Structures are given as C-alpha cells and as structure tokens.
C-alpha cells in the first residue's frame, strides 16, 4: 500500500490544486458572470456527451484494466495493446453517433417543455462525444502504466484554466452564446490531444499489432466482458445522470444550474478517492487475475478506510461552513436553494467511497456479470423516485432520489462482493473514524460564531482540521498515514 499512498498523494496534490481553481471559478466566477440557465445548458450538454461516450467506449476503459496484464510487455510494445485500445472505441463511435442522431425526436419531447434551449445545440454534442471517448481511453492507458499525475493535471487543472478563459470571454460579452458553447466543447478537444501527447512519451503507442497473439479463449472472454459492460452501461450510465436530466426536464435549465453548483460542492468530497482508486485499479486487476482474493480484500479495506477518512473530513468541513459559503458567493440567495442537495449528495458520495471499490473487485473477477441483474431495477427506481420527489421537493428531491439509489445499489453490490469473494471493507479503523467525525461535529457546535463570514470559515476550518488530524494520528486509524507523518517528523528533527 506504500506505493499506492505515494502515487495517490501526487495525484491528490494535483487534484486539489485543480479543486481550488475549480472552487474559485465555480463559486465566484461562474455564479457572477453566467446565468443559471447558461450553467444548466453546459451541464446538460456535457452530461449527454458523457452518456453517449460511455456507450461509444464499448467498455474500453474497464476492459483495458482487466485485460492489460495479458498483453503487458514494454519491450514488445505491449503486444499491440494500444491498437486495440484505439480501434474498439472508434468502432463504438461509428455505431453510437448514428443512434444519437436517430434519437433526436424522443430527446426533443423530453426537453422541449422546460429546457428547449438545449435542443438548439443538439448536434454540437457529436464532436464532444468523440473527444470524451478518446480522452478517457488515453487516460486509462496512462493509468495502466502507473502514471496518473500528468493526466490528472490536464483534467483537474488544465481543463479548468481553459474554461476560465471561455467563461470570461462570454461574461464580458466578447463571444456570443454560440461561441461560448463552441469554446466549452473545444476545451475537451485540447485535453484529449494533451493526454495523447503525454502517453506517447511514456508508453508505446504503436499501431502495429499481431492478431495471432490474441488467442480464441481471450477473444471469447473479451467479447463476453464487453457485452456485459455495454448492457450494464445502458442502466448504470443513465442512472448516474438521471438527476440532471430530470431536473432539466421537469424544472428547467435555470434550476439545473442551481443543482449543478450545489452538486459541485458535494463532488469535492471524493477528490482524494479519484487518485486512490485510479492507482489501485491495476493492482486489483492483477490480484483478481491471479486469484489472490486475500490481497484484493486487504486492498479493499485499506482503500475504503483512506477514502472515507479523507472524504469524511471534507464533508464535515463543507457542512459546518455551508451557510457561510452561500453567504459569500455571488448571487448566493439564488443558489442557496441547493443547500440540502450538498448534504444528500455528500452522503451518497461517502457511501460510494466506502463501498465503491468492491464493485472494482467484482468487475475484475469472474463474477462481473452479477451486477447486471440489478442495474435495471435500480435505474427504474431512480426514474420513479426522481419523478415523485422532484415535483414535491424540487432540486432537493433529486438529491434524495440519488441517495436512495446509491443505498440500494451499493448494498446489493456489497452483498455480491461478500458472497462471491468474501470481501468486506469494514474494519476497526472505520469505526474509530466514525467516532472522530461525530466528535468534530460536537466540537463545531460549541465554537463561537464570528461576525466576519470569511474569518469564521478560516478559523472554523483550521481548528476542526487540526483536531481531526491529531485524533486520526493518536488513534492510529491509518498505519500508512501515521508512517508518513512519523517520517516527516523525523526529517524535521534532523534538519533542526
């Protein structure tokens, strides 16, 4: 786990730099210069692009992690693996894009009442689909080569900085709305090309290949796995975007903008988990390929603990400052409608951080097909809960629907993990961590309120953060984290 911690730390540092840029951009620039409708428009465009990109990949990003160990050999250009990595999603794009064109009429019926503006940019989504597909594929290739920092820099920092330029150009009326949407999409094209250039410098990107290397059993296994991923994506990808689509359909793009800002606050919670999961996936794939469920389950426990430790602290800091955050952002009286969205989406993120890696283990095992039996039921439940709760509770109803779907889907997934590979993420460390979080909320309750909102946020966050770090260290919740802290203390003592 030591190499995982070091690699994850590098990725997390980059990610937090991007998160800081994203927070400043989203909370103070976007809310100042963009109307909620503009925020909602770009969010829907992106989510529709991501949805169809998920199908167009034909499961490449997941199957690459599963099957790369069979090809890995740098001296032989990984036996033509990059060729298949490009060919399969290219075929997927040639299939999915015509389907997208054929679906214009039903999509029109879904959005025309409250979000007709999106329909004016329907065809603009097509290039975005292509950019998103290959960007993800090239990122996956970098992950397979255990190099995540630069691709994360592109995703978390580069994209955000480029979007800042687009937002400012539009906010100061230098470009029209068409220019704004075009610039927004172009940012993802640049990101795709940047990651392609990077992977060409660190790993073989030759299109030379040898069909004879791919045995018939491997072809059969790959075909079955890809078919499963496609079928699973049909439900899973839609489920992850139901809230955005149904808020847009039932309430309009302006409310989608409000929901997007609140949702963004909650997504900050799982930033560390992105690095931890990314670097652990190849390790999990190798362990499951070798049938070493003991190593895989030990990895599961540590990943869950470290993800919950970081996510729980961030969730606590956000929620104890939630009113102050809405008080300082531009037009906060408009976006405060999403306050409880932050809470419920935050809880769903914590559930995912605690139990989500179990799905990774299942995905890389011979039992990968089990989740398929439930994904459509959960998707149907998601549609029903959104349909019932949004008219009653508005954007908060959409977030509650997401939480309900997360509880049911992750509980079922954990049942499969436990039954099939005896996986269990729970440990005494997680129990201690829960006690620490409760203690932090109690401490915050007795902290005096400072009249200056910004000073209140700074002192409250600093105090709670320091107490959290001390408690985690003293309780020895994470031996890996304690080891890093002890190492830093020794270095400081040597220097002094």
Image (spheres, grey):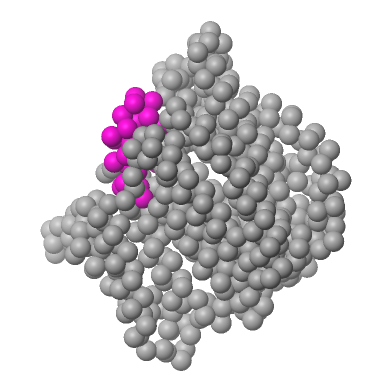
Q: Residue at x 63, y 75 (%)?
A: 337
| Res 255 → quadrant | bottom right
Q: Position of residue 46 (x, y in %)?
A: 68, 51
- For the residue pair 409 and 444, the one nearer the viewer reads as 409
Q: Residue at x 44, y 27 (%)?
A: 366
- For the residue pair 309 and 494, the one nearer the viewer reads as 309
Q: Position of residue 411 (x, y in %)?
A: 46, 49
Does the rendering let one see residue 273?
Answer: no
- For the residue pair 46 and 406, the one nearer the viewer reads as 406
Q: Position of residue 175 (x, y in %)?
A: 78, 61
| Res 403 → quadrant | bottom right
Does the rendering let one see residue 431?
Answer: yes
Position of the N terminus by quadrant = top left
Q: Position of residue 458 (x, y in %)?
A: 41, 78
Position of the C terminus by quadrant = bottom left
Q: How many marks?
A: 0
Could you tell me what secondary structure mostly forms the magenta stretch?
Answer: helix
Residue 289 shown in magenta: yes
Residue 455 shown in magenta: no
Q: Residue at x 44, y 79 (%)?
A: 457
Q: Residue at x 51, y 68 (%)?
A: 343
- For the residue pair 156 and 257, the one nearer the viewer reads as 257
| Res 227 → quadrant | top right
Residue that sits furthest to the top in the current view: 212
Query: Quick check: 40 left or right of 404?
Result: right
Q: Which residues are magenta?
A: 279-304
């Amino acid at each position: 786990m030591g190499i995982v911690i070091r690699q994850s730390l590098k990725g997390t540092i980059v990610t937090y730099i991007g998160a800081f840029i994203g927070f400043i951009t989203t909370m103070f620039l976007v809310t100042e210069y963009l109307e909620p409708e503009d925020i909602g428009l770009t969010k829907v465009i992106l989510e529709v692009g991501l949805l169809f990109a998920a199908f167009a990949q034909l499961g490449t990003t997941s199957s690459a992690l599963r099957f790369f160990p069979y090809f890995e050999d740098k001296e032989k250009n990984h036996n033509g693996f990059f060729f298949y990595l490009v060919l399969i999603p290219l075929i997927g794009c040639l299939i999915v894009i015509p389907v997208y064109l054929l679906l214009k009429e039903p999509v029109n019926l879904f959005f025309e009442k409250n979000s007709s503006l999106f329909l004016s940019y329907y065809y603009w989504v097509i290039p975005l689909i292509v950019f998103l597909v290959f960007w993800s594929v090239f990122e996956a290739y970098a992950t397979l080569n255990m190099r995540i920092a630069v691709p994360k820099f592109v995703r978390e920092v580069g994209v955000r900085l480029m979007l800042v330029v687009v937002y400012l150009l539009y906010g100061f009326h230098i470009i029209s709305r068409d220019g704004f949407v075009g610039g927004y999409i172009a940012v993802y094209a640049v990101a795709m090309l940047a990651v392609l250039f990077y992977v060409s410098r660190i790993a073989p990107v030759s299109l030379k290949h040898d069909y004879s290397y791919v045995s018939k059993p491997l072809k059969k296994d790959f075909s079955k796995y890809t078919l499963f991923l496609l079928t699973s994506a049909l439900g899973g990808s839609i489920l992850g975007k139901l809230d955005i689509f149904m808020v847009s359909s039932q309430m309009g793009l302006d409310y989608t903008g409000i929901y997007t800002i609140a949702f963004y606050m909650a997504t900050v919670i799982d930033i560390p988990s992105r690095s931890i999961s990314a670097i652990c996936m190849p390790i999990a794939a190798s362990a499951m390929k070798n049938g070493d469920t003991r190593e895989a389950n030990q990895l599961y426990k540590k990943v869950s603990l470290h993800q919950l430790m970081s996510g729980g602290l961030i969730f606590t800091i956000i929620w104890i400052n939630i009113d102050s955050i809405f008080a300082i952002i531009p037009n906060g009286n408009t976006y405060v409608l999403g306050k409880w969205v932050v809470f419920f989406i935050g809880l769903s993120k914590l559930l995912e951080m605690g139990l989500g890696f179990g799905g990774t283990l299942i995905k890389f095992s011979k039992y990968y097909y089990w989740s398929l039996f439930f994904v459509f039921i959960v998707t149907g439940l998601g549609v029903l809960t959104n349909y019932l709760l949004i008219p009653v509770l508005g954007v908060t109803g959409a977030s509650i629907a997401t939480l309900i779907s997360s509880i049911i889907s992750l509980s079922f997934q954990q049942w499969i993990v436990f039954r099939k590979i005896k996986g269990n993420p729970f440990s005494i460390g997680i129990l201690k961590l829960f006690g620490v979080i409760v203690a932090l909320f109690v401490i915050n309750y007795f902290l005096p309120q400072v009249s200056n909102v910004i000073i209140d946020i700074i002192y409250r966050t600093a105090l709670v953060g320091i107490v959290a770090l001390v408690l985690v260290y003293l309780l020895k919740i994470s031996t890996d984290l304690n080891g890093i802290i002890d190492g830093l203390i020794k270095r400081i003592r040597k220097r002094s």
